[in-house]
Image (cartoon, rainbow, N blue to C red):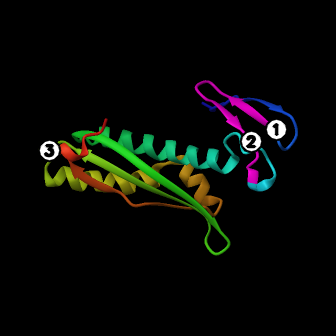
Amino acid sequence: MDAKINLKTVWNGNTKGNGIIKANYLETKIAIPELLGGSGEGTEPKELLVTSAVACYTMTLAAMLETRKLPVAGLTMDSEATNSKEEGFKIMHYPHIILSADATEEQIQSANRAIVAADKGCAVGNMLKKADVQVGVQGKVSLLSKENVVS
């Protein structure tokens, strides 16, 4: 089955204007960054690209953790994108998996392996890698305690 994604975009004004992109479950403002002469009053293309990579990695990781039947108490992630002449475009994910307090060492190791496997299994990340974007992951696994309750 071929996947089809339909988006509707409306743009108002010139380069200082802004627009809206709508899809089934997405509605977001877009704008040219101020740095490039735009209004900056919306998401810019690279931010959307990184958001897509973040969503793909997170969902891939969540599915892998469920498949492994791990006692996940929480999953959070920070991601960072940088663009430099020396290194090009780079995206780093920093997932933090919190397992229940009684998780075994084997389950902790399985969660650590899932962090790496999700990077290899994320379709969007793999497309970006083919386009010479560096995508990496540095995750951590910890056990549930009073200090790291996810709310």
Choose top left, top right, bottom left or bottom right for residue 67: top left
Q: Is residue 126 left or right of residue 110?
A: right
Label 3 environment density (alpha carbons within 10 Å; few <14, some 14–19, many ≥20): few
Instruction: Using the numbered discs, state the Cα–Cα distance from disc 3 to disc 2 in whole angstroms.
Output: 45 Å
Part of the protein shown in magenta: 17-34
Cβ atoms at labels 1 and 2 below 8 Å apart: yes
**Three-letter code for the amino acid on which mark 2 is drawn:** Ala
Secondary element at tag 3:
loop
**Three-letter code for the amino acid on which mark 1 is drawn:** Gly
Secondary element at tag 2:
loop
Q: Quadrant of the N terminus?
A: top right
Residue sticking out furthest to the right: 14
Q: Is residue 26 magenta?
A: yes
Choose top left, top right, bottom left or bottom right for residue 128: bottom right
On the image, numbered disc 3 is attached to which residue? 101
Q: Is residue 144 visible?
A: no
Q: Is residue 43 magenta?
A: no
Q: Quadrant of the C terminus?
A: top left
Tell me which residue sits at (61%, 72%) in the image. Answer: 87
| Earlier-in-chain disc, 3 versus 2 | 2
Estimate the x, y position of residue 86 in percent, counting from the top left. Answer: 64, 75
Tell me which residue sits at (66%, 51%) in the image. Answer: 46
Residue in front for this viewpoint, 93 or 150: 150
Residue in front for this viewpoint, 55 or 82: 82
On the image, numbered disc 1 is attached to which residue? 17
| Earlier-in-chain disc, 3 versus 1 | 1
Label 2 environment density (alpha carbons within 10 Å; few <14, some 14–19, many ≥20): many
On the image, numbered disc 2 is attached to which residue? 31
Estimate the x, y position of residue 110 in percent, counting from the top left. Answer: 25, 52
Tell me which residue sits at (55%, 54%) in the image. Answer: 126
